[in-house]
Amino acid sequence: MPGLYLHTSNRLEVLAAGLASVLGSPLADPFAPETVVVQSVGMGRLLSLRLAEAHGICANGAFALPHRLVSNNLLQTVPNRAARRHERRAHQAWLVRA
């Protein structure tokens, strides 16, 4: 089901198991990438390994950092637009409360 899923934990193993559960059923379009927002490149790599262990393969996954996700969505929404000051990583603040 498309949408935003927010999983919180202080243990990466719990987060990886939850992600494997959500990604257990394939998307309707097999060529559409599944986007997962992570806090670091290392976390994305570790999650891809955990998904490969759980499902036998991890392919066409996009592990994006929050600032990249926002910038890419803005560029898709407003084409021919250069990155502005408020779209830079240092100027994006995220506050997530459970």
Image (tube, rainbow, N blue to C red):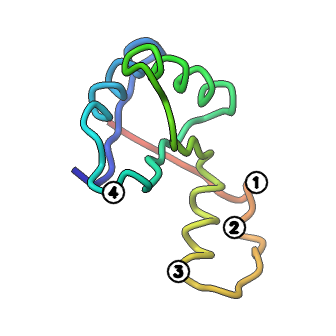
Question: The C terminus appears in which quarter of the rendering?
Answer: top left
C-alpha gap between disc 4 and disc 1: 35 Å
- Earlier along the polypeptide chain: callout 2 or callout 3? 3
In the figure, 35 relative to 98: above or below? below
Q: Nearer the viewer, mark 3 or mark 1?
A: 3
Give the residue type that dot 3 points to: Thr
Residue on which disc 2 sits: 87
- Residue drawn 65% across and 57% down? 92
Q: Nearer the viewer, mark 4 or mark 2?
A: 4
What SS does tag 2 mark? Answer: helix
Residue on which disc 1 sits: 90
Please state the horizontal and vertical placement of residue 21, each as a whole percent of the image: 27, 26
C-alpha gap between disc 2 and disc 3: 14 Å
Residue on which disc 4 sits: 29
| Other-residue count near label 1 (Cα within 10 Å), few / some / many at <14 / 14–19 / ≥20 | few
C-alpha gap between disc 2 and disc 1: 8 Å
| Other-residue count near label 2 (Cα within 10 Å), few / some / many at <14 / 14–19 / ≥20 | some
Please state the horizontal and vertical placement of residue 71, each as a whole percent of the image: 64, 65
Q: Nearer the viewer, mark 4 or mark 1?
A: 4
C-alpha gap between disc 4 and disc 2: 30 Å
| Other-residue count near label 4 (Cα within 10 Å), few / some / many at <14 / 14–19 / ≥20 | few
| Other-residue count near label 3 (Cα within 10 Å), few / some / many at <14 / 14–19 / ≥20 | few
What SS does tag 1 mark? Answer: helix
Give the residue type that dot 1 points to: Ala
**Could you say which quadrant of the image residue 18 lies in?**
top left
Which sits in the foreground, 66 or 55?
55
